[in-house]
Amino acid sequence: MTRLENLAEKIAAENLDAIVISKPENVHYFSGFRGDSTVLLIGKNFRRLITDSRYTDQAKLQTKDFELVEQSDGLIKKLAEEIKNCGAKIVGFEGRAVTFAEYTRLKENLSGVELKSVEVDSLRQIKDAAEIANIRRACEIGDRAFAEVLNFIRAGVSEIEVAAALENFMRRFGSEKTAFDTIVASGIRGSLPHGVASDKVIASGEFVTLDFGAKFNGYCSDMTRTVCVGRASDKQCEIYDAVLSAQVYGLEVIKVGVSGKFVDGAVRERLNRAGYGKYFTHALGHSLGLEIHEDPRLSRLSTCESLAAGMIVTDEPGVYIAGVGGLRIEDTVLITDDGAETLTNAPKNLLEL
């Protein structure tokens, strides 16, 4: 089924007369439009895209099968008018994306209309062929950028300089922008799982963890690699080998039919047996697509009971030792009927620069 057909089933299942789509990623997903200050109003016999004069020409180019409605006196006011015009009495909205102030204003303008919070992000969990192609391309951009930035990483260069070079390479190779704030964490800062690049200067003998992503046609990639500047110590090699072994094992257990909790637990146990499980302090992975963090999750709290072909997840175990440092290795992974296909293909062996 198409995306809009899946949404129509959701509307019917929730007994709605119409639904309002306001989260930018979902506006993009269901209509093709890529801009802000825009909502979709969709019912059984109508599809309307409501925006302002800044985006009307763009909307004409990017969307089809939607009636374009231009507003000039406020988006909420025009949305309320369109809901009244279509005669809808039970209207769904994205409760996790709408602010309380927006909800209150809409409610004040819609007396006699029931507003019902509905979750539609789950409709994006299984990626179609076009989405997979976009994510694959974003991953290829990341692979190329990583290969280039290896020539830039050395003692005496700051983390933020490395991040700037990496982001520049991604843009040169076709990335629209970064998928998230680039992480470059060296030495003792490697114990920070989300150590966004700082002015710290990289020293010889330090691990440098790089976690970064490109965007292509709105779709994200996500990859982490850790390198060593100079010769790694025996202890560094031991920790690196433990994380790499767990990460590769994750690729073996990620498959159709298993739960997100099972995958996380299996990889966590592999690190436990190596003696480093207590230093693995976050979930194993998450899905990604139009957003960098989507469902399903690979975690102790995952609600995904059965992974399915077409889902894309990350596999990213790490070890973080306060006062010492740490590292992470991460791939973006497509789940297929045959297992897990890595979409990020930069080398994972320990590189000593």
Image: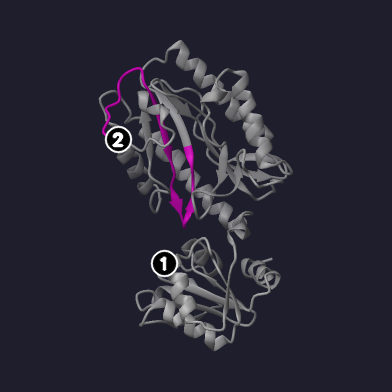
Q: Position of residue 341 (x, y in %)?
A: 62, 40
Residue 58: quadrant of the picture:
bottom left
Residue 63 visible in the shown view:
yes
- Residue depicted at 65% across the width and 41% down the height: 260
Q: Position of residue 145 (x, y in %)?
A: 40, 39
Residue count near mark 2 (Cα–Cα under 10 Å), binned few <14, some 14–19, many ≥20: some
Q: Is residue 306 left or right of residue 347?
A: right
From what the image shows, is residue 214 above or below residue 157?
below
Q: Earlier in the sequence, mark 1 or mark 2?
A: 1
- Residue depicted at 46% across the width and 64% down the height: 24
Secondary structure of residue under mark 2: loop
Residues 145 and 161: in front is: 161
Question: Which residue is labeled 1 in the image?
Answer: 35
Residue 60 visible in the shown view:
no
Q: Is residue 292 magenta?
A: no
Hey, what amino acid is under mark 1?
Answer: Gly
Residues 149 and 159: in front is: 159
Q: CA distance from mark 1 to mark 2?
A: 31 Å
Question: Which residue is labeled 2 in the image?
Answer: 198
Q: Is residue 353 left or right of residue 348?
A: left
Q: Is residue 203 magenta?
A: yes
- Residue depicted at 38% across the width and 35% down the height: 195
Q: Is residue 255 left or right of residue 89?
A: right
Hey, what amino acid is under mark 2?
Answer: Ser
Q: Position of residue 295 (x, y in %)?
A: 59, 50
From what the image shows, is residue 211 above or below residue 180?
above
Stretch of the chain drawn in magenta: 198-223
Residue 190: quadrant of the picture:
top left
